[in-house]
Image (cartoon, coloured by chain):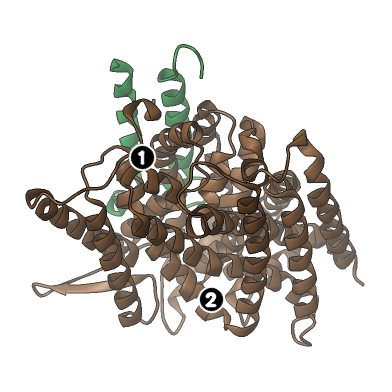
Chain colours: A green, B brown
Amino acid sequence: MHRRGWYLLLLLPFVGTLLPPLYNHARPTLFGMPFFYWYQLGWVLVTAALLGAVVVLTRDRNGV
Amino acid sequence: MSSAGVVLSVAVAGVTVLGFLAARWGRGNLADLEQWALGGRSFGTVVSWFLLGGDLYTAYTFIAVPALVYGVGALGFFAVPYATISYPIALVVLSRFWGIARRRGYVTAADFVRDRFGDRTLELAIAWTGVAAALPYIALQLVGMRAVFAQFGLLGAGGALPALTIAFVLLAAYTYTSGLRAPALIAFVKDTLIYATVIAALVVIPSRLGGWAHVFATSAARLASRPHPSSIYLAPSQYFTYATMAFGSALSLFIYPHSITSVLAARSREVIRRNAALLPIYSLLLGLLALLGYCALSAGIAPKDASSVVPLLFARYFPSWFTGLADAAIVIGALVPAAIMCIGAANLFASNVFREFSAQRSSVETATAKIVTIAIAAFALLFIFFVPVPYAIDFQLLGGALMLQIFPAFVFGLWTRWFHPKALLAGWASGLIVSCGMAYESGFTSNFTLHAFGASLTGFIALYSLAVNLLISIALTLVLRISGANAGVDRTSAADFA
């Protein structure tokens, strides 16, 4: 049952993306993109990685 | 005919053949509702990835998101956090729903609500909400197609109308014949085309415009010099709007009937779980595509209708045959979700409106769903001919707000039977009234400004009405529980959720 704790990782994307004052900036830029844009695109990748981790870590032992 | 026109026609003809051939895929008895409507619940990780991707990221999305960024700047980028946080929600909610749906044979969300709360009126409310939200959404897929057909100079002469009609009649025919297997198979073509064209666009267009730094700089200048200036950054007054739009949209994405239909077609719970982690690849694509809105601004593209921004951008930077591929991606990208939306809405009608209480599904139910699919496609076509496009968008926004009002009964219902069904019904009705009222007051935009204590807060209407819905549901449940009112029969058991 303790494996359920991994699901708490999934709260991070909500904190990271739903507070615009955190990232509503021009700098630092990446490939000429303002921070506002590449930061949010970055969260797409981070969220996918977190989801992948949670899916693996909470998998039932019988694999179903 | 231009080479773009040839490529487009060949692609549409090709997927039509695929759509009919899909009936032979997997050898299911298509008179069985689970075979016709859910592909026999047999799709593995890869098929589900294409199907869900083809279903959720519609042509309208690919047209409208860049158009919104082109039109309003940073605020239009809310689609990216929306498409990010949708998946943690999907992982938790859908894997639980998939389990009980498989065990108890549900085809719709309203099937679950009927079983869980034993209230016919609540079931009907959930079902009709889904149908009402699906209709304008299907109609908007036609807007995406029409933007493409307009490129061929067809629209002015009214010539886009026969093209649209032919495409949609073909769609209705193969969906009738093959059910969900048709869009599932066509989704492979759609997504291959979408990835190929979008990646090519992102490689070619920004560098032709002098790089991203230049694209953002010129876009910022152009947005600032408009009669209604906007910016490539959010104004502080937009923070709450941005966050509520992203969060509210994410909550409603997976409770739409077309999402439920695709999810229930998965073979196992693990397929859903894996896809929650794999589908964000599409979100990345969507985010990059949104930035094409700035490329269009930077390139000085000035269409009469913002939905033409992406097709015009492709026409300017690519040879005709490649533009034809991009146009095919948009048209096929509209046909796939439109087919699934028709099936999802038809399932609600057949399984929840038409069907009497019965554990047995019959071939009559399948026949009903098939006929209703055609009726819905026809209705969507008429809708787009007779309702001006801005109204279709208004209806779709309103539909999204209505859709979210099933959240307490459906999603909270997956974990708790604490709510009283009549309280949920009252909450749903209040949410509906608040949505319509706020939409009317705000002139059918997606946001409403609340004024209280000398301050004002502009937020997503769907979320405001969900808050009212929840308050009413909780308060009335307390009252009904204290007064000892009969809370109806729950046919599910804890083991069903395992």
- Is B144 situated left or right of B127 in this image? right
Q: Tell which of B306 and B217 is nearer to you.
A: B306
- Seen as rendered, the residue at the extreme bottom is B157
Residue A24 screen position, x and y as percent: 34, 55
Q: Name the residue at the right extreme.
A: B1
Q: Is residue B218 above or below residue B406?
A: below
Mark 2 sits on what residue?
A: B392
The reply to whether discs 1 and 2 touch (Cβ–Cβ < 8 Å) is no
Residue B345 x/y as whole percent: 55, 59
Using the rendered view, name the quadrant where residue B346 is placed: bottom right
Q: How many marks?
A: 2
Q: Chain of mark 2?
A: B
User: Which label is found at residue A13?
Assistant: 1
> Would residue B9 appear left or right of A39 to someone viewing this image?
right
What is the distance, in whole Å, between disc 1 and disc 2 at their CAs?
A: 32 Å
Position of residue A33 in the picture relative to residue B324 (left or right): left
On the rendered image, what quadrant is the N terminus of chain B found in? bottom right
As drawn, the label of residue B168 is: none
Frontmost residue, B76 versus B330 = B330
Q: Comparing marks 1 and 2, which lies closer to the viewer?
A: 2
Q: Are marks 1 and 2 on the same chain?
A: no
Q: Chain of mark 1?
A: A
Type of the residue with mark 1: Pro
